Image (cartoon, coloured by chain):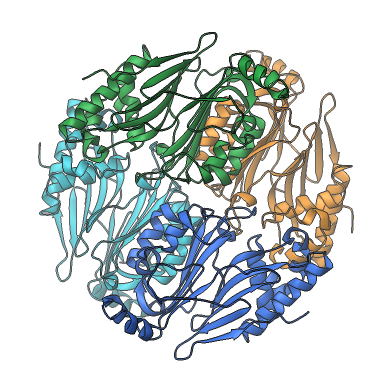
Chain colours: A orange, B cyan, C blue, D green
Amino acid sequence: MCRWLAYSGTPLLLDTILYRPQHSLIDQSLHARMGVETTNGDGFGIGWYAPESGSDTPAILRDVGPAWNNRNLREIAQHVKSPLLFAHIRASTGTAVQQTNCHPFRYGRWMWMHNGSIAGFHQMRRELSLAVDPRLFLDIEGTTDSELMFFLAMTFGLEDDPPQAVARMVGHVERTGREHGVADPVQMTVAVTDGTAVWAFRYASGGTARSLYYSTKVDSLRALHPDAAYLRELSEETRLVVSEPLGDLPGAWNEVPEHSYGVVRAGHDSLHPFTPVPA
Amino acid sequence: MCRWLAYSGTPLLLDTILYRPQHSLIDQSLHARMGVETTNGDGFGIGWYAPESGSDTPAILRDVGPAWNNRNLREIAQHVKSPLLFAHIRASTGTAVQQTNCHPFRYGRWMWMHNGSIAGFHQMRRELSLAVDPRLFLDIEGTTDSELMFFLAMTFGLEDDPPQAVARMVGHVERTGREHGVADPVQMTVAVTDGTAVWAFRYASGGTARSLYYSTKVDSLRALHPDAAYLRELSEETRLVVSEPLGDLPGAWNEVPEHSYGVVRAGHDSLHPFTPVPA
Amino acid sequence: MCRWLAYSGTPLLLDTILYRPQHSLIDQSLHARMGVETTNGDGFGIGWYAPESGSDTPAILRDVGPAWNNRNLREIAQHVKSPLLFAHIRASTGTAVQQTNCHPFRYGRWMWMHNGSIAGFHQMRRELSLAVDPRLFLDIEGTTDSELMFFLAMTFGLEDDPPQAVARMVGHVERTGREHGVADPVQMTVAVTDGTAVWAFRYASGGTARSLYYSTKVDSLRALHPDAAYLRELSEETRLVVSEPLGDLPGAWNEVPEHSYGVVRAGHDSLHPFTPVPA
Amino acid sequence: MCRWLAYSGTPLLLDTILYRPQHSLIDQSLHARMGVETTNGDGFGIGWYAPESGSDTPAILRDVGPAWNNRNLREIAQHVKSPLLFAHIRASTGTAVQQTNCHPFRYGRWMWMHNGSIAGFHQMRRELSLAVDPRLFLDIEGTTDSELMFFLAMTFGLEDDPPQAVARMVGHVERTGREHGVADPVQMTVAVTDGTAVWAFRYASGGTARSLYYSTKVDSLRALHPDAAYLRELSEETRLVVSEPLGDLPGAWNEVPEHSYGVVRAGHDSLHPFTPVPA
């Protein structure tokens, strides 16, 4: 199990997003409330876009120790601003604790992070690997189900139509699962971005999907909390999607419905049902 | 807060002591029950004597990540036997997470590990450092209160009379504390060994000391549990001292009384009151 | 490029093999003489058998920093004895610096380490991966050509006939290379062991193979150097195979001929020509 | 021995300064030309000011492995711009390889890095530590001579008059050395900054000081190399101070004379003789 956070909006110091909230992601690395495990100490990663650098690929910082005691993470958080941040804390379910197994994963401009797992992954790994486009295969660096889901989604057209590609990826894993006698293989919340929009998915082949929340629109929050000065500094388009709420501000957090996905992009956020495409 | 374990007795595979018990120290690194913090993921260390190597100094293995996911620790545990093992998992209270701050600390044949803290240590650090014998000062490598307590105890004659040296060390810290307006500076459980005997202390200047337990004598345990085959393989002199019990075997664990210390050595274990020597 | 060492014979403190020689492997990690690179600082690993532990699998200690400054390696070396040791220092040619890419690799009782590379590996990786027995595929943890060569050799019967399996593995890689337009894909010195014998291979598809040396028989060395006391402590069957000589003792080191392999085992060492089996 | 680099001037992507030059600092981590050791693989650090973050303290990124294979360093370099960068690669002379021993060191707005050593440091460490202002002592985190030189310079007024404070620090160490029978204790090149100016010192108590170079003024370089497009993008005030030249551009590099220091600041760089103040 893992926890993650996606931020999009007014460029902020990463510290404001990562460390300052009452029940911040860093706090969740020691004391998650809604997860299967309370501790997420098997590595972490953040990825952010830095338009002023002239690069359209995100910067990725990953390390194998816990986030809560990592000094480099704290330094970066206190000195870097970004309009789009992914952050992830990991609880390994057995795969090696190494940078190449830490989220977010990157391919060109794209980033991907995941909470959940593929049931029976060990026995399906080879077959799922074979389904990856051979030109992409070369860039698989780790051994997690999460990275493989990313490369499968790339194979199925992520760059052209993210919801469709993720739906085909899930359909493919579910069929492969059935062939190996695994009834409900997919358990996931996933965030993916190309630096302009963020897509966030919540889905489980069976049972309840992992928790996922999105923040209320900034103008509505301002109306609810006219005294909260920091809300005045945020643009209308600022949005957070998180594994669990970062605090207790009334009205601030909304559950993403199961089997659905949201799109966060300038001017028109939206929420849609999510249905796998049978393979 | 930290957790530790001291084993002395029949040479065993470290795995048997570290990983196999129901509520093992490795399990405590994720889920401690009796500590201030449930997670002890800020580094770990083990130290063991290897008489067959021809060396009378203990081997020390320390690393900065959590014990629960460390592969080298597991490898060593599955391939090394020892008659005397110290193991420690760390929850930093602010000092850097680095090998030189991980327990056990070593000086020649001696090893030391600690759970607890010196209240107000930051303001007393310089003065306590000055009290260390200048010839020993050179070997201080880290920045913890625990290592400094070890070097103070060495200064006060640990090699000649451990209980007396620890009592003088505590007395010295308490006096220094009073001079800095800290009423109750010492909170500690400490284990120290020279490879032949183990001394274990439980003490707090004020309030309740951190938890500490010792295992029941092997022959009494055998009488209580005649069906437990593994007990038959242990010598009479086998003994564990631990921050919290490693399992629920009835009759196996006894609390070390507050303000006392025990000595584990071939043939004559003993328990004594502990009183600081005023400095 | 990397450097490695295989020791088999009288149980010795690892320190004697790893640190004490004049031009030890640890020295080679900073100052290799015969390699493509002088520095081998991208991780290291050792593997040793510990018969007294009751386990017939070797213990593996690997880490991602340089060997020359690793304290845990030094501790283990000074406190552990073994009759059979593999040691490897790595200079990455681009793949990630992580434990799962460090040699030696292990499968059950077997260990494998490699110096060299598969030319064009990036483009052949997927196809070579597919040739691995699906039941073995699940245990591939890293991303190196070296580990994949091990799993291919396992697929081709390493456990039954090591020289034949390695010859088939090389033949398979060479055919795959030709299909991808790589004329001379294999450059290797490889050591493999099951804990009783050691096989060491030196081969290149084209050009000169990486350097490889074996130590002179102990009784011959004693005759050459009657004053060297330490030679008297070694059994007749003690043998070292190394990427480069560990010192300048006249008569001590012999080059393994190109395109050949040696077998080190109790009572009857031998040297043979090595020819790939065309796939 | 170590190597370092100080950059001040037009805000540049760190990559341009750290990785792009022909004989970059990253290249020097594997292949230094002018140092006592060719390999500087015992940790590294960078520190940079990020005015846009609203913080006037520099960000510090340090790690214990070699710079040449560190992915986080490469990521930061490719996505962060700064007008003032310190970078340091370390070759330990025995002290522990840990973040708190990596340069640059920071205190508030100030950064410090050092190449060289205090001869006889081990025996003088305690006495030099005592000379540190007690209020500063608490913030010493590591065990190097370099960090202690920084805290001594702070004690002697670094924030008010850097050249004077460094001269007093050197005078103090030289006197302490003499008292311990060390004739020529100080060997140093040091860079220190408060975020607005950079001071760089080259000095040895005896013999030749470690190498140190500064870059030619940008307008003079442009006149020498009218075809070098990248020079046109740099402001007049851009300056590099380095342990060894980053390339072979004729006329680009000037040796800092022994026993001297330079000041780099907007509008008026200058070079001065350096004489320790006897303590």
Residue C269 position, x and y percent, is 49, 87
B148, above or below B121, in the image: below
Q: Quadrant of the N terminus of chain C?
A: bottom right
Position of C220 with respect to D121 (left or right) is right
Name the image quarter holding residue B244: bottom left
Viewer-proximal residue among A166 and C8: C8
Query: Does the image show residue A21?
Result: no
In the image, what residue occupies the spot 42% across and 61% down? B24
A162, above or below C60, in the image: above
Query: Does the image show residue C184?
Result: yes
Name the image quarter holding residue D107: top left
A72, above or below C139, in the image: above
Residue B198 position, x and y percent, is 21, 60
- Which residue appears farthest toward the bottom when viewing the image? C267
Viewer-proximal residue among B16 and D156: D156
In the image, what residue occupies the spot 67% across and 58% down? A143
Position of C225 with respect to B97 (left or right) is left
Position of D148 with respect to C35 (left or right) is left
In the image, what residue occupies the spot 37% across and 59% down? C74
In the image, what residue occupies the spot 32% across and 34% down? D145
Residue A106 position, x and y percent, is 72, 44
Residue C13 position, x and y percent, is 34, 70
Q: Quadrant of the C terminus of chain C?
A: bottom right
- Which residue appears farthest toward the top when viewing the image? D267
Viewer-proximal residue among A237 and D132: D132
Viewer-proximal residue among C256 and C12: C256
